Amino acid sequence: MTKSNPAENGPLNAMEESTLDGAALDPKVLETIGRALKAHYDDLVQAPLPEKFLHLLARLEEEEREQSWGKPDASD
Amino acid sequence: MPPTSFRDELVAEISNLRAFAISLSGSVSLADDLVQETLLRAWSKSDKFQPGTSLRAWLFTILRNIYYSNYRKRAREVQDSDGAYARRLIVSGDQESHLDLEDFRKALARLPTEQREVLILVGANGLSYEEAATICDVEIGTIKSRLSRARSKLVELLALDNSREPPAEHQKIKQAS
């Protein structure tokens, strides 16, 4: 049941907001979607990462270290 | 040279970056290329990052730009989305969810990319409208309307009961109480 639905308190503002903010949707439906979205996204975030990204960053760091060592010193 | 802590901060964001990339492209293999390119660019432009600001938002901006300039067409061609990537990644269903996740993913995949990305930025990542607007390079009002249209479209695609009546008997969708 609808208890504290802001759309029913201030018709004008609420109508304007509702088209912008999704407030026209039942709060329960919004909550259901919100939960599903989080569950979906959390699964993606928690999926095991390929090692290649860590290797890439390690390689980049290594390359830069070598470059900064290999640079001829200006004061030389 | 970026300080070592910058690398650590990057590492901490990879999972999220990849999740965003999969959500955008609908393809795990494209997403991995996209993340790789984003990391390379972020590394080479690390001096452009302003400490104290959100690294995640900065990385999302880079990834998004790369996606729209180089990957969007490929994403349409590849399409291992439509739940295929999900089945590969998802080990177990979420008991907490009131929606069949597989159905939800299919519906999400059918949204226009502009709407889907706003859902992911605001709804899943909890970014503010302002941050999302900066990342997508649009006005805040545009973010709000895309979000609204995305939600309405999802409700439609999932045939969710939005009648505000006491929920009718339904096989799959239990309304949150």
Image: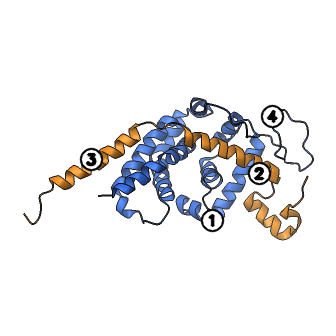
- Estimate the spatial distance between the alpha carbons at disc 4 and disc 1, rounded to whole Å: 35 Å
**Residue at coordinates 71% horizontally, 49% vertically from top-left?**
A34
Q: Amino acid at mark 4?
A: Lys
Q: Nearer the viewer, mark 1 or mark 2?
A: 2
State the residue lying farthest toward the left.
A76
Q: Which residue is mark 2?
A: A30
Residues behind callouts 1 and 2 on a single chain: no
Q: Position of residue A17 (x, y in %)?
A: 77, 65
Q: Nearer the viewer, mark 3 or mark 4?
A: 3
In the picture of the structure, the residue carrying the numbered disc 3 is: A62
Disc 3 to disc 1: CB gap under 8 Å: no
Colour for chain B in the figure: blue
- Residue B129: % across, % down: 62, 63
Q: In this figure, which colouring scheme has been used for the structure?
A: by chain
Question: Regarding mark 1 in the picture, which secondary structure is present there?
Answer: helix
- Disc 1 marks which amino acid? Ile
Q: Which residue is mark 4?
A: B172
From the image, which quarter does the N terminus of chain B lie in?
A: bottom left
Amino acid carrying mark 3 in the image: Glu
Marks 3 and 4 in Cβ contact (< 8 Å): no
Q: Secondary structure at mark 3?
A: helix
Q: CA distance from mark 1 to mark 2?
A: 20 Å
Q: Earlier in the sequence, mark 4 or mark 1?
A: 1
- Measure the alpha-carbon separation of dots 3 and 1: 41 Å
Q: CA distance from mark 3 to mark 2?
A: 48 Å
What is the drawing colour of chain A? orange
How packed is label 4: few (under 14 Cα within 10 Å), some, or many (20 or more)? few
